[in-house]
Amino acid sequence: MSELFGVEGKRVLITGASSGIGLHLAHLFAARGAKVGLAARRIERLESAVAELRDAGGEAMAIALDVTRPETFAAVFDAFEARYGATVEVLVNNSGIIYIKRFIDQERAEVERLFDTNLKGAFLVAQEAARRMRSAGSGSIINVASTAGLRAGGLLASYAASKAGLVHLTRVMALELAARGVRVNALCPGNIETDMHAAFRAEQIDDGVLKRIPMRRFGQPGDLDGAVLLLASDAGRYITGVALPVDGGQTLSWM
């Protein structure tokens, strides 16, 4: 089973890797012998993270990436290939931002920035990866969506819409790319305790959310590990087009 779920030697690129889920997954893959590229805007944070991963015996590199600047994407993937000698095998498409506001109060600039990051940016990063994976004849793209993209909830109009779009984009990508050996799936975390979750804490809505989680606890980044390794490894070789919730049962609850 360890071989089936193994990612040793796999070339993995993670966007939004300077904090939160992305940084946690960089540690996950590096600890299991993958060759990891950490990509994000905050290059100083990435370099610190890469130093830590290397000190622990992992193989990692930092790449500056702003997902709202698609003209730079080819250079990002070229830099990854130059370092590791071949194209990306696993893309964890994780960059994202959030605004917690009522639909009617959302400002136009906020909506545009969020969609540019969460949906348009994710689309174009995945497109660059898919073109290269298609030429190689294999690959796995994991779009990090959210349970907010699977069910309605208040105060998250733009975020939920962007993640719902990403879930459906995942299905279309999976359909088009399957015959070329590229699998595409969406990971849909629930409320995972990260920097982004701190925004819920600041709005003092934690208690209400917690009551709607059947397992009665918030998730930890490590709760995503099994699902991510499944989708990235040979264990998931016949899985594509799936939106996989990891949420303590929250999508089942109508409380």
Image (cartoon, rainbow, N blue to C red):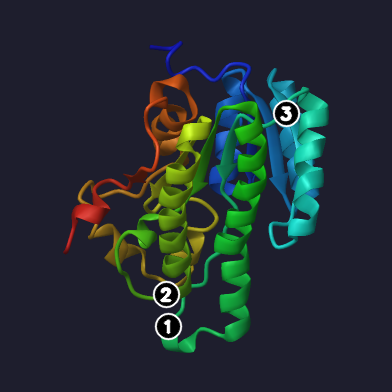
Q: Residue at x 40, y 75 (%)?
A: 155
Residue type, numbered disc 2? Ala
Number of other residues with Cα within 10 Å of mark 1, as a class: few under 14, some 14 to 19, many 20 or more = few
Quadrant of the frame with the N terminus: top left
Q: Is residue 116 above or below residue 129?
A: below
Quarter of the image with the C terminus is bottom left
Question: Is 11 drawn above or below residue 168 in the view shown?
Answer: above
Q: Earlier in the sequence, mark 1 or mark 3?
A: 3
Q: Which of 121 and 27 is in front in this view?
A: 121
Q: Distance between the residues labelled 1 and 3?
A: 40 Å
Q: CA gap, disc 2 to disc 1? A: 5 Å
The circle on residue 157 is 2
Q: Kindly identify the residue that appears in the image at 70 percent across and 30 percent down.
A: 87
Q: Nearer the viewer, residue 177 or 170?
A: 177
Figure quadrant of residue 2: top left
Q: Mark 3 points at which residue?
A: 60
User: Badge 2 local density, few (<14 within 10 Å), some, or many (20+)?
Assistant: many
Residue 216 pos. (x, y %): 24, 50
| Sequence order check, earlier mark of 2 and 1 | 1
- Amino acid type at image mark 1: Phe
Question: CB atoms at circles 1 and 3 under 8 Å apart?
Answer: no
Using the numbered discs, state the Cα–Cα distance from disc 2 to disc 3 in whole angstroms.
36 Å
Q: Are marks 2 and 1 in contact (CB under 8 Å)?
A: yes
- In the rendering, which numbered label is found on residue 129? none
Q: Where is residue 192 in the image (x, y as percent from the top left)?
A: 42, 49
Quick one: label 2 or label 3, which is nearer the N terminus?
3
Counting labels gives 3
Judge whether 163 appears above or below 182 on screen. below
Residue 16 appears left or right of 4: right
Q: Would you name the residue on which mark 1 appears?
A: 103
- Point 61% across, 18% down: residue: 33
